[in-house]
Amino acid sequence: MTIERERRAELGAFLRARRNQLVRADLGLPPVGRNRTSGLRREEVAYLSGVSVTWYTWLEQGRDIHPSRQVLDAIARTLRLSVAEHTYVLTLVGYSAPEPDAQPIPRAAPPHVQRLLDALDGFPAYAIAPDWYISGWNTAYAALYPNVATVPAEDRNLLWLVFTDPYVRELLPDWEVTSRRFLAEFRAEAGPRLGDPSYARLIERLLDASEEFRAGWKSHDIEGFASRERVFHHPVVGDLHLEHHRLAPSDQPDLHLVIYTPVPSATPGRPSGR
């Protein structure tokens, strides 16, 4: 059996299993016969999804047909699939994961993420939301950047702080290079969300507050994040040579954790980016 046939067979088996697990009353359907209260008929799924019974039957049978993404989305809604199940169906046919529902950007890291940050104490680490709002941090990060705990909550945004906080400018030895790298990374990640209110407010405030930001924003530079060595000039302990990494929890893919680890036998590097 080829890989494509195996995937079609798996898709059909998966759809049958989910169809048989549905509670009919949840969809406003009466029992079948006298006692059967769970499981939908194929024709019911087809009708609710807007496809023909024959076509849906072929899909469950693993026939060589090519359903559109819109049809699979409709079937996923009918079968009450979770996000993970919906993604599984789409990937079996070769489509990308579904677009996430628009959710308010959280202003506090979930408790389990904050516990992870605390467990990393000794290594400066923080959590950052999609709009670069700093939503959590540990004591080591607060020691590196004490203002994170004292700035007004509305200003606790990494991009805002890089371009407006004099402490950050002193902390980063080549601030001019670093700030432009930050901006290029932010723009690369924010592109699909630039129309969102939180992004629009942030950019408008920065355009008003920072001449350097205005110049960088006009350049339209784009750059992806990369783990790399950073140098910080701390006012108490002097130069710190750290390597920073960024991770995304699997259950919070829009939330990034940035973690700094010591560089063994560090020599001065070229700090850039976040």
Image (tube, helix red, strand yellow):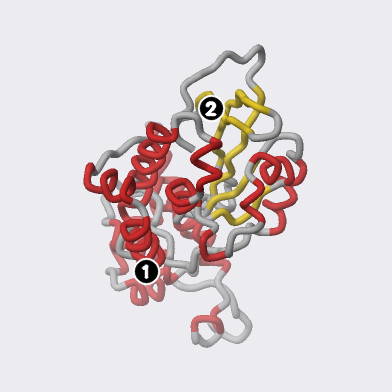
- Check the image and report above or below for 77 versus 270: below
- Direction from residue 242 to residue 138 in the image, left or right: right
Percent across and percent down for residue 33 are: 55, 84
Can residue 24 be seen at all in this image of the molecule?
Answer: yes
Residue located at (40% from left, 46% from top): 91
Amino acid found under the numbered disc labelled 2: Arg
Percent across and percent down for residue 13 are: 48, 52
Amino acid found under the numbered disc labelled 1: Pro
- Direction from residue 75 to residue 232 in the image, left or right: right
Residue located at (36% from left, 43% from top): 183
- Check the image and report above or below for 108 versus 144: below
Percent across and percent down for residue 232 are: 57, 30
Determine whether label 1 and label 2 are within 8 Å by CB.
Answer: no
The label number, if any, that marks residue 197 in the structure image? 1
- Which residue is more in the foreground, 65 or 81? 81
Quarter of the picture holding the N terminus? top left
- Mark 1 residue element: helix
Can residue 13 be seen at all in this image of the molecule?
Answer: no
The label number, if any, that marks residue 61 in the structure image? none
- Mark 2 residue element: strand
**Quadrant of the image occupied by residue 176:** top left
Residue located at (73% from left, 39% from top): 120
- Which residue is more in the foreground, 145 or 237? 237
- Direction from residue 94 to residue 9 in the image, left or right: right
Which of the two marks, 1 or 2, is nearer to us in this view? 2
**Quadrant of the image occupied by residue 25:** bottom right
Question: What's the distance in space between the residues labelled 1 and 2, CA to CA?
Answer: 32 Å
Q: Earlier in the sequence, mark 1 or mark 2?
A: 1
- Which residue is more in the foreground, 87 or 139? 139
Q: Which residue is mark 2?
A: 230
